[in-house]
Amino acid sequence: MAADNNFKQFYDSELHDLLQPLETERHAVKKLAVFTCLLFVAAVIAFIITSSSRSAIAGVLTLILFLGGIIAVVRLYYRKKAYVSKYKEAIVRKIINFIDPSFQYDPGSHISRTDYNASGLFIEKPERFKGDDYIEGKRDKTFFCFSELHTEHKVGSGKNAHWETIFKGLFFIGDFNKHFQGRTYVWSEYNPQLNFLNKLFSSFAWDLAKVKLESSEFENRFIVYSTDQVEARYILTPSFMERLSKLQDMMGQKTAFSFVNTNIYVAVPIKDDLFEPSVFSANDYNTIGDYYNTVQMVLGIIDELKLNQRLWTKE
Amino acid sequence: MIIIAAILVFLLLLVIIIYNKLIRRKNAVDNAFFSMDVMLKKRYDLIPQLVDTVKGYMLHEKELLTNLTAMRQKSMELKSSANDKVVLDNQINDILQQIFIKFENYPDLKASENFLKLQGAINETEEQLAAARRFYNAAVNDYHNAIEMFPSSLVASWMNMKHKTYFNIPETDKAVPVITIN
């Protein structure tokens, strides 16, 4: 997707020159990555020779190659980390500043676990919680923040125990334009945690009831649960339902929304890392334009849902 | 003999289940109406303020304002069924919509700070009322499905359950005008 003309000008005047030293750095990291792979391939070949010939020299060589490979992996890890960090500071920060200089960007930070839990979008409690690329600011009247998040929990036990992803993608919180007391959830698919037994014993789900809305198109896309039937309709007006559907088209089928503590929470599952430059592909206008478009798409939540149009009591 | 007894017990259980379901639906409509009644009262409280604020400006709409005041009075005094209230509210809603459209013809009024504050409060109440109406209509729809579908329709006619009136959802409710005051 091509970014707009203003961004093209900004890219030519501000970013293009910054990319040159970063490209040199990227090539160095790429070379190190290739060298590391070769070391391991050589180590495996040496190991096969050692096993068949039982030669002491081949054995020593295998050991040296493996040790060299491990050292190279450690070096690669730190080198790549330094490159990504430099890249984010130089390029991503500039893009955010270009969109709005008042926006704050913290590449190492993320949406807090408390906020994530408050959203109620994911009922399973995460045991692993990580993320990065935290951005916050105020667009007109609406405070917002978002970051990448990856949450996991452990399933199974003993040998079968493994980590399972609960959510990976972009997590957005915005100040909603209406006051409300209860909790309303708009999921894109049935949440098995809301079955009869869980509803009886869960402090989260016991007061939730399904909200049947008039729009069959909306009903086909989303499942709505709320603690207050009237309030759910106060939030989900017919025009707002249309806007949520449009946003789902933009963001992806599994996008989920919740309305809690007068905030709107949006969880957009995304497989790839958002602002993570790849070592193996060149950084050009298209790659950088994608970062710009991603931020604009997230800000589009505020514009598309008209969160700046405020009712009297929430000026 | 046992088979007949089993069928009778089954039928009795079925009637009890249907009866309870119908009562649940009826109570849901009553609850929905109650939550809407609260919103309607909130709106009735705003109508005199609205009339007081605009009557000095909207000299050509005197009849409309008098009608609105009379309807509001009638609705406040109404102690009869929910159906009557629904019909009256639909009429009040029509008049309010006409008045809202006429605001456009009075730039002086639109510039008045009192009016803007009041319109903000009315917008909020109308949004809440629109939500309460939709909840009420959803409850009435479930209730109608229950009293019309077989076999619950048999029990419903035995219980003398009647149809309820829907609230009109004006087209404008789909996008209640929101004003922003800077």
Image (cartoon, coloured by chain):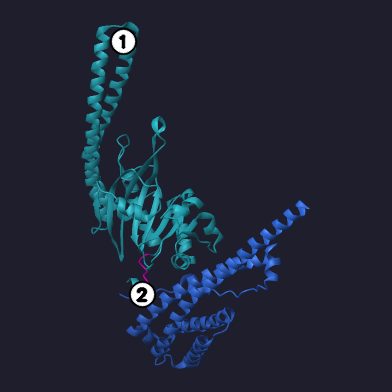
The answer to whether residue A307 is visible is yes
Q: Chain of mark 1?
A: A
Q: For the residue marked with disc 1, what is the amino acid? A: Thr
Q: Is residue A120 above or below residue B35?
A: above
Q: x%, y% of residue B7?
A: 74, 55
Marks 2 and 1 sit apart, C-alpha to C-alpha, by 79 Å
The residue pinned by badge 2 equals: A312
Is A244 in front, or is B153?
A: B153
Q: Colour of chain A?
A: cyan
**Image position, residue B167 (x, y; %):** 56, 75
Q: Are marks 2 and 1 on the same chain?
A: yes
> Which residue is at the far front?
B1
Between A103 and A283, the residue placed more toward the observer is A103
Label 2 amino acid? Trp
The majority secondary structure of the magenta stretch comes to: loop
Question: Closest to the observer: A51 or A239?
Answer: A51
Q: Which chain is blue?
A: B
Q: Is residue A308 magenta?
A: yes
Relative to A276, residue B170 above or below: below
Q: Which residue is mark 1?
A: A50
Q: Residue B12 vs residue B56: left or right?
A: right
